Image (spheres, rainbow, N blue to C red):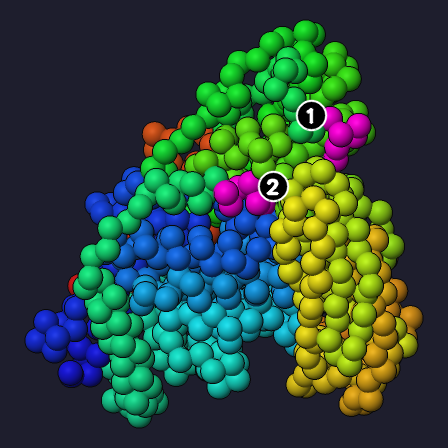
């Protein structure tokens, strides 16, 4: 192939396909979202789930399946989505997403698994391994530190190396090492000043050389920053295609000897390998059983629901009881999130259809309120404004609870909400976003046909202000001041009361733990179902590291297993530990010497000590700034100064300025400094949101993303001439006539 052809191969053909070169026997390949089911768009493509897609099974979202803590289940879902991909001619599907839930307000948390890197990584690895068994590829995303939606396209995630490694990269590391995904998607944002697409240390040093990744890296849709740097870094495929983004600059860089053609060859070879493998996998049409997948979606929702409260064993309901069914979501279930993961389901049943209308609240033995977050409260492209439910939903719960002492609340939401009403109701069942068969799952759970066995994969704080990052999240730059103290790592160490802890969840049955044993580095514990229902228990193992050296969380999840037990049945669960269970990142993984306590159990505040291990490891020095710092004794929010000391440098926020605007700035950055940009801002916003209902999730997503797209991203999406955008940019920088000349130029 010529150099030009190789460069062209490394950009998509259009929104979803790679380029074909029949002369060289290179077919094109179709990709599509996403993590919870396919979103194959055959006519108009978009990256925020606005236009229609082919029907596919809508599985519960990651926020929900994470609560199953069930690697096998995630594997079954991965395999089912891959089967639908094969059926629909899709070679690689874009999921799973393993970003850490750093703050509960991130609008896209519903697409991610957990605040804990180990749990997120293990669930993703199983999903990937099973999805890829028959040759269809997955794409782990968004690599890395994409933890806010606000300004996601040009924000800079600023964090220290230890936090990066221990918290934010670990889920990717596990997913890559164990799952061996065929592709990885680099994130939109920068990390410490470098865009992920240009980040050689990230995409080659860490991903390939350290973790052994041998697949392809593609950009998130329009995340390519500098195509020349991207080739050098190992960013292989620029998506979406159609703009020839920086193709000329790449040619020039090769001609000048600044870019090695071998870098392009390597990326082109990876594209060829990916598309040929996909073509092979798609050769044999295997019929796909969409009914069976609907069943799997139901089972997944049942296995993932978390019973948060169940006073007086009010649940399960009894057949003879008179039940009131209350709330808008009874007729309009919230079962998936908005954005690129949005699926056109093959079936959808409403709760009211399976539960019936029921009786009036006054007359009912039990009142069941179906509530949660409406779609416009959370979605891709924007963060939540607060952690509360809509006032009218809270009012409804309180009114029903006042009328009927036996009130059960069923929550549908993609992230934790404040629950000041929790003490007023008898039971709370958290369904998350349960997918297309959520209503049937709910019926089975309410009536005890299925027994809730999920446990929370993230902490539910009492109120938003309890989160360490509450006062500085989100800003254009992600200031990761809290360091490694994300989720329970913070709440535990700061001793902050929360509503429900990470790892918490009830069942209709009871489990007893006995004989925790530590033998060398093998841990075992026996679990017995002492109640009267068959059920499943999630056994968790935490390592509590020494607290007298480098600052560390009080305990960290290192192993888990889900066991199914009949009433009276016992099983012994065994875990093998390895060095990583004890390690910190200090210029490499090191095990600090000291005493480590091994804790096992099913509820976070009822853990048993299996034993202690005295490690004679490496010396890990206490950083000079640590004594007396927030990181030693976290409480509230860390100050900017404390963080800078930990970071080892001053933080300099990016302040967009006239005269210095670049292609990385967005209309929203420039509108207050330039009339041209102001006109563009309002026009683009108006045009993009035309015909949409203000306040809806789609409106919020489009209104926000249209004007926060950096100019280069607009160029990639639109495929318009680069000089058009460079012309606008020159005008915004005060060089009006130069800009005009560029605008009129033909490239
Ligand atoms: C999202 C990705 C998605 C892609 C394609 C982007 O906006 O961040 O997760 O896969 O669009 O739809």
Q: Residue at x 36, y 38 (%)?
A: 345
Q: Which mark is residue 305?
A: 2
Which is nearer the eye, 256 or 299? 299
Q: Cα distance, mark 1 to mark 2?
A: 14 Å
Q: Residue at x 85, y 82 (%)?
A: 614
Q: Residue at x 63, y 8 (%)?
A: 360
Measured as percent of width and height from the top left, residue 502 is found at 72, 52
Name the element at disc 2. Answer: loop
Measured as percent of width and height from the top left, residue 163 is found at 68, 71
Which is nearer the eye, 366 or 253? 366
Name the element at disc 1. Answer: strand
What's drawn in magenta, residue-wise? 299-314
Q: Is residue 591 left or right of residue 207?
A: right
Which of the image's four quarters has the N terminus? bottom left
Q: Residue at x 79, y 51 (%)?
A: 512
Which is nearer the eye, 600 or 282? 600
Asked if the stretch drawn in magenta spans residue 548, the answer is no
Measured as percent of width and height from the top left, residue 482 is found at 74, 62
Q: Which residue is mark 1?
A: 408
Q: Residues within 10 Å of mark 1 (few under 14, many from 20)?
A: many
Which is nearer the eye, 229 or 327? 327
């Amino acid at each position: 192939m010529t150099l030009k052809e190789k460069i062209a191969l490394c950009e998509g053909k259009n929104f979803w396909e790679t380029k074909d070169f029949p002369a060289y026997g290179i077919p094109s390949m179709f990709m599509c979202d996403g993590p919870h089911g396919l979103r194959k768009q055959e006519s108009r493509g978009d990256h925020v789930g606005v236009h229609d897609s082919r029907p596919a099974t809508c599985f519960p979202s990651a926020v929900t399946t994470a609560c199953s803590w069930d690697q096998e289940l995630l594997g079954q879902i991965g395999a089912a989505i891959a089967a639908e991909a094969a059926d629909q001619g899709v070679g690689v599907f874009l999921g799973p997403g393993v970003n850490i839930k750093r703050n509960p307000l991130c609008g896209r948390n519903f697409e991610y698994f957990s605040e804990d890197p180990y749990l997120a990584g293990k669930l993703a690895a199983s999903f990937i391994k099973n999805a890829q068994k028959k040759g269809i590829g997955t794409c782990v995303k968004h690599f890395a530190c994409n933890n806010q939606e606000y300004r996601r396209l040009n924000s800079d995630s600023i964090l220290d190396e230890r936090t990066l490694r221990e918290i934010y990269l670990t889920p990717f590391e596990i997913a890559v090492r164990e799952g061996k995904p065929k592709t990885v998607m680099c994130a939109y944002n920068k990390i410490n000043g470098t865009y992920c697409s240009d980040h050689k240390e990230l995409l080659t040093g860490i991903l390939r050389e350290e973790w052994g990744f041998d697949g392809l890296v593609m950009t998130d849709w329009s995340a390519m920053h500098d195509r020349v740097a991207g080739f050098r870094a190992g960013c292989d495929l620029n998506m979406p295609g159609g703009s020839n983004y920086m193709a000329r600059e790449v040619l020039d860089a090769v001609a000048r000897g600044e870019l090695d053609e071998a870098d392009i060859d390597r990326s082109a070879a990876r594209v060829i390998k990916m598309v040929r493998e996909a073509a092979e996998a798609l050769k044999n049409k295997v019929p796909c059983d969409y009914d069976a997948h609907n069943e799997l979606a139901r089972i997944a929702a049942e296995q993932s629901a978390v019973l948060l409260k169940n006073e007086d064993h009010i649940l399960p309901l009894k057949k003879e009881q008179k039940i009131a069914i209350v709330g808008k979501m009874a007729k309009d279930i919230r079962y998936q999130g908005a954005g690129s993961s949005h699926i056109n389901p093959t079936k959808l049943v409403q709760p009211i259809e399976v539960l019936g209308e029921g009786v009036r609240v006054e007359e009912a033995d039990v009142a069941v309120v179906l509530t949660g977050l409406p779609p416009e409260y959370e979605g891709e492209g924007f963060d939540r404004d607060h952690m509360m439910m809509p006032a009218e939903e809270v009012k409804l719960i309180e009114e029903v609870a006042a009328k009927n002492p036996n009130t059960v609340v069923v929550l549908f939401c993609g992230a934790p909400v404040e629950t000041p009403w929790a003490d007023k109701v008898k039971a709370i069942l958290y369904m998350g976003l349960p997918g297309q068969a959520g209503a049937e799952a709910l019926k089975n759970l309410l009536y005890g046909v299925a027994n809730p066995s999920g446990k929370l994969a993230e902490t539910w704080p009492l109120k938003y202000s309890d989160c360490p990052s509450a006062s500085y999240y989100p800003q254009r730059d992600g200031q990761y001041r809290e360091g490694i103290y994300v989720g329970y790592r913070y709440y535990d160490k700061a001793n902050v009361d929360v509503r429900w802890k990470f790892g918490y969840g009830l069942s209709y049955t009871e489990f007893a733990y006995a004989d925790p044993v530590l033998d060398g580095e093998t841990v075992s514990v026996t679990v017995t179902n002492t109640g009267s229902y068959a059920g499943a228990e999630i056994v968790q193992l935490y390592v509590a590291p020494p607290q007298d050296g480098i600052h560390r969380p009080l305990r960290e999840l290192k192993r888990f297993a889900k066991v199914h037990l009949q009433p009276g049945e016992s099983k012994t669960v065994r875990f093998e530990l390895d060095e990583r269970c004890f390690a910190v990142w200090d210029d490499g993984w090191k095990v600090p010497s000291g005493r480590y306590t091994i804790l096992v159990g099913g509820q976070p505040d009822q853990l048993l000590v299996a034993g202690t291990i005295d490690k004679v490891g490496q010396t890990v020095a206490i950083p000079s700034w640590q004594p007396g710092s927030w990181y030693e004794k976290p409480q509230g929010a860390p100050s900017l100064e404390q963080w800078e000391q930990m970071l080892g440098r001053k933080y300099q926020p990016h302040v967009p300025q006239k005269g210095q605007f670049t292609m990385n700035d967005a209309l929203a950055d420039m509108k207050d400094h330039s009339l041209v940009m102001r006109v563009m801002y309002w026009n683009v916003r108006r045009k993009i949101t035309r015909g949409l209902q203000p306040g809806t999730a789609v409106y919020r997503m489009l209104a926000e993303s249209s004007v926060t797209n950096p100019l280069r991203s607009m160029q990639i999406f639109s495929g318009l001439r680069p000089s058009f955008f460079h012309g606008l940019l020159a005008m915004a920088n005060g060089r009006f006539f130069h800009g005009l000349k560029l605008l009129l130029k033909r490239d």
